[in-house]
Image (tube, coloured by chain):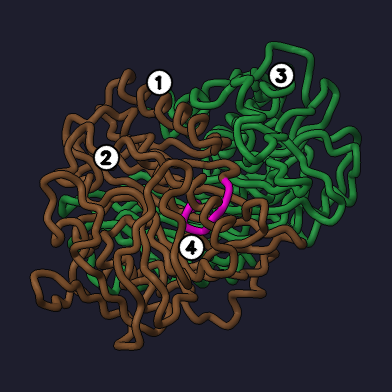
Chain colours: A brown, B green
Amino acid sequence: MRESEVIAEVVARNPTLATAGGATVLVPPGDDMALVELRGRRVLVAADQVIEGRHWAPGTPLRLVARKALARNVSDIAAMAGVPSCAVATVALPPDMPDDEVRALAAGLHDAGLEFRCPLVGGDTGTLADAGAPLVLSVSVLAEPGPSGRVVTRSGARPGDLLCVTGTLGASAGFGPGGHHLTFTPRIAEALALVDALGDRLHAMIDLSDGLAADAGHLASAAGCSALIEAGRLPVAPAIGWREAVGLGEDYELAFACDGPPPDAVCGTPVRVVGRFEAGRAGQVSVDADGMRHDVSGLGWEHGR
Amino acid sequence: MRESEVIAEVVARNPTLATAGGATVLVPPGDDMALVELRGRRVLVAADQVIEGRHWAPGTPLRLVARKALARNVSDIAAMAGVPSCAVATVALPPDMPDDEVRALAAGLHDAGLEFRCPLVGGDTGTLADAGAPLVLSVSVLAEPGPSGRVVTRSGARPGDLLCVTGTLGASAGFGPGGHHLTFTPRIAEALALVDALGDRLHAMIDLSDGLAADAGHLASAAGCSALIEAGRLPVAPAIGWREAVGLGEDYELAFACDGPPPDAVCGTPVRVVGRFEAGRAGQVSVDADGMRHDVSGLGWEHGR
């Protein structure tokens, strides 16, 4: 069972879900966030975690680990074109963790909450039973639709739409301390600007956590079409080839489908057309490079089992 | 550092918190849930986790573990007199966990969501790097105030108020498979009925997760007064003495402070007056038993470091 299936299995296609609780579920699991309606008010909600040994390298300052945990969630808010409201967190701590490291984690959560205007308002701290067990930091966030009221989901791309990305791809190569995955700023402002600039021409959006090949595949899969990437158009980080640019995860840029050309930049962040959606096998992603077409549907970062 | 201090340190007494994000924080961390206002709509939010080796015994079916993870959160909703809306979860799985156990966990989350009218609407599943690392299941919940609009916090008890509890104490003794901590039903209906029955005479409420000694201490501490329990009045489970009844955690009953007598029962669940709040050292809890007064302020279940 691949990890993406576990939570999905809980809720996917459950006809009773939408009316089971006090919330009406408008966008169900499978997108970057769920959209629920609470007595007429739409609220976005998501949860994400970082695990020692999986999401950061040994020696990474815990202040940055905490920032990353919140930033990943805020990146999901950007993917929906939402505005952050607040966060809650649970921390499972190794019993042998020194107090100053615990305080660094707490300070990192606090500071990141202020930085992203998504303050931590509650949570729980527990202790793992065994020394050496890995730290697990889980963060959940609430958000609201932006000023336009528009929420942008993963589905909605159409054959003929352009596939576009913000910023640079492949910058998290190496996953070392100080890397992009620890210091990125989620694209909240850029997402809201894209909604303003493109209006109804913005058809679908996702944040690049698994790599462009996988995440363009998620957009294509949700739309029942395929995607074609042109290697020569990719905005790659220095010393990164096209395979790494589409295969590495943790870019935390936006990828979106739009009808007609996007702006060259939003909020000072470059926007590039890197390909297009086509009628084809649902979810298939190909790259035109070196005069050949490469199927990259299987490529990408999956914290799989 | 005791666990209760870690999350609290992030946010306590931070003057910038209330206006840092899109949410206005009406009830800050330190209560059972945070209460935030999103553009005029009040939303309750909380997070809690269960950790293998700490919150369940080896051999416990994962379906019950999943139920417990959600039920603990829903018990926090009851403590605020809220109504569940929806939940999100993150699961950190040992890499060697068989697929059928993963499916049992997913099924447990799903079924509990329907049982408590608090459906899982999203989340994330990740894999721990090392075989043998403990499973960590984190759940966050959203809730709304009940029909009366009243949210009941931990603070508000006054000297002279009665200390009351629902149900029976000490039923989770042993923490074994099949125990009360795996099968309890959170007191959502009872909490709403208490708000209706007592109105403004209901001054403060908490759910009993750490044991009555510790949780009555939380009520007393928040109110700047002390609490006195009469051992002879405690509704103890069979074969349980008063020390266990006030010291064991995981009752998941309600404890509350009210001015004047409560109803004998709500929703078929007995309600007992077990003591009173007094002017005294803030947070001190004593038990009158065997003709003596015992200070039990240090007693209780803390998943401490």
In this rendering, the label closer to the viewer, 3 or 2: 2
**Does the magenta-highlighted stretch encompass residue A80?**
yes
- Residue, far bottom: A280
- Which image quarter holds the C terminus of chain A? bottom left
Marks 4/2: CA distance? Answer: 26 Å
Dots 4 and 1: beta carbons under 8 Å? no
Q: Secondary structure at mark 4?
A: strand
Foreground of the two, B104 or A179: A179
In this picture, is A103 found above or below B97? Answer: above
Same chain assignment for discs 4 and 2: no
The picture places residue B43, in percent across and down from the top left corner, at: 69, 48
- Which image quarter holds the N terminus of chain A? bottom left
Residue at image mark 4 = B122
**Label at residue B226:** 3
Three-letter code, disc 3: Ser
Q: Which residues are magenta?
A: A77-83
Q: Secondary structure at mark 1?
A: loop
